[in-house]
Amino acid sequence: MSLASYIGCNVQLQVNDSESEELIYIGACFAGDEELDSVRKYQFSTPFVYEVSSHWGIEITEYINEDTLNESKQKLLELCKIMDKYLQKGDYFELYSCWVGEERDKRVGKVILPIYGFNIQQLVLPEKTLVRFEK
């Protein structure tokens, strides 16, 4: 199984046609159309849903190894930079990470954060947590 991260937003984004070597990119990696439809229906409040990846989802907990933890923090900060370019003041995007196939499962939590200014070192984002980033 693979950990996938998804974003939901109210604007269409440019999607990478193929996997990229960038730290994070918007486009298919692990999930298919069925997973995207499920996460849209069961987790998000937005019409547009995308997988975001760099070959592993975003999870920030004490239970993952230090390299993966640091990479997840970097990916999250990069994702916020990317989304800042698409969003207008007052808009938001949502982030949800789970194991592929668990998109319909009940959430374990919900967090609302500003798109900038949160303390990444104190942030805890386990899988199945919906995060709403507001601009």
Image: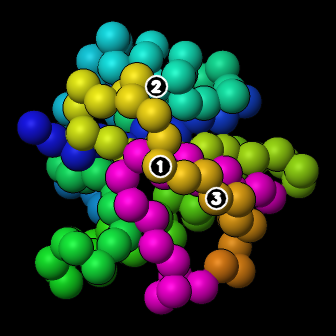
Q: Which mark is residue 39?
A: 2
The percent position of residue 62, horizontal first and vertical second, equals 29, 79
Along the horizontal axis of the image, is 4 left or right of 39?
left
Of tags 1 and 3, which is closer to the observer?
A: 1
Q: Which residues are magenta?
A: 119-135
Question: What residue type is disc 2 on?
Answer: Val
Residue plotted at (75% across, 47% down): 92
Local packing at callout 2 (Cα closer than 10 Å; few below 14, some 14-19, many 20+) is: many
State the residue in front, 19 or 53: 53
Q: Which mark is residue 18?
A: none
Q: Which residue is mark 1?
A: 108
The percent position of residue 23, horizontal first and vertical second, equals 31, 62
Of tags 2 and 1, which is closer to the observer?
A: 1
Q: Which badge, 2 or 1, comes first in the chain's sequence? A: 2
**Image vertical order of residue 15 relative to residue 111, above or below:** above
Residue plotted at (60% across, 23% down): 48
The percent position of residue 29, horizontal first and vertical second, equals 22, 34
Mark 2 and mark 3 in contact (Cβ < 8 Å)? no
State the residue in front, 5 or 103: 103
Tell me if residue 126 is in the magenta stretch.
yes
Question: What residue type is disc 3 on?
Answer: Val
State the residue in front, 114 or 63: 63
Residue plotted at (61% across, 44% down): 94
The percent position of residue 87, horizontal first and vertical second, equals 75, 47
Helix, strand or loop at label 1? It is loop
Helix, strand or loop at label 3? It is strand
Residue plotted at (88% across, 53% down): 89
Q: Which mark is residue 111?
A: 3
Question: What residue type is disc 1 on?
Answer: Val
